[in-house]
Image (spheres, rainbow, N blue to C red):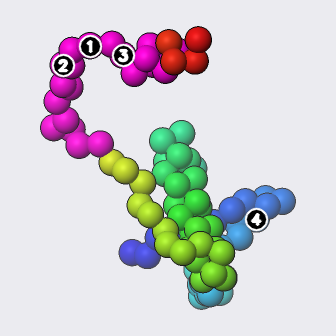
Amino acid sequence: MDIYMGTVKDGVVLLPEGVNLPQGLTVEIRVPEKSAEIKNQAELEHQFKQKLLKKGLLAEVKLPLQVSRRTIPVSLKGKLLSEMILEERR
């Protein structure tokens, strides 16, 4: 099964360029949940950055940093960085 993302405009689903479905094909449309909308936004941002890259407006597209679930907080001694900055500005 192929999956395509589209946008609804005036009650009609518009598919991306190059997607050609057979005439009369019955399709299933699912309305995404909020988390799916966020993922869709991330995909749209990635596609936008790819277009900028192709036009030469970006040198590279960096993937977003992902925090590992195995990350363990580290205890540090001393002042907080924010406190040090505030003291230096006084």
Q: Is residue 49 magenta?
A: no
Measured in 3D between alpha carbons, the distance from the residue under mark 4 to the one under mark 1, in whole angstroms, is 60 Å
Task: Return the residue at label 3.
Answer: 80
Where residue 49 sits in the image (x, y, percent)? Answer: 58, 68
Where residue 69 sits in the image (x, y, percent)? Answer: 21, 38
Would you identify the image quadrant in which residue 58 lies? bottom right
Q: Residues within 10 Å of mark 1 (few under 14, many from 20)?
A: few
- Label 3 sits on a secondary structure element that is loop
Task: Return the residue at label 1.
Answer: 78
- Label 4 sits on a secondary structure element that is strand
- Label 2 sits on a secondary structure element that is loop
Q: Quadrant of the N terminus?
A: bottom left
- Label 1 sits on a secondary structure element that is loop
Is residue 32 shown above or below 73? below
Is residue 18 shown above or below 14? below
In the rendered structure, which disc, 4 or 2, sits on the residue that comes first in sequence? 4
Decide whether the magenta segment is chiefly helix, strand or loop: loop
Under mark 1, the amino acid is Gly
The label number, if any, that marks residue 12 in the structure image:
4
Under mark 3, the amino acid is Leu
Magenta span:
67-86
Under mark 2, the amino acid is Ser
Q: Residues within 10 Å of mark 3 (few under 14, many from 20)?
A: few
**Closest to the observer, 28 or 52:** 52
Where residue 33 sits in the image (x, y, percent)? Answer: 52, 42
Which one is in front in this view, the residue at disc 3 or the one at disc 2?
A: 3
**Closest to the observer, 3 or 72:** 72
In the rendered structure, which disc, 3 or 4, sits on the residue that comes first in sequence? 4
**Closest to the observer, 78 or 68:** 78
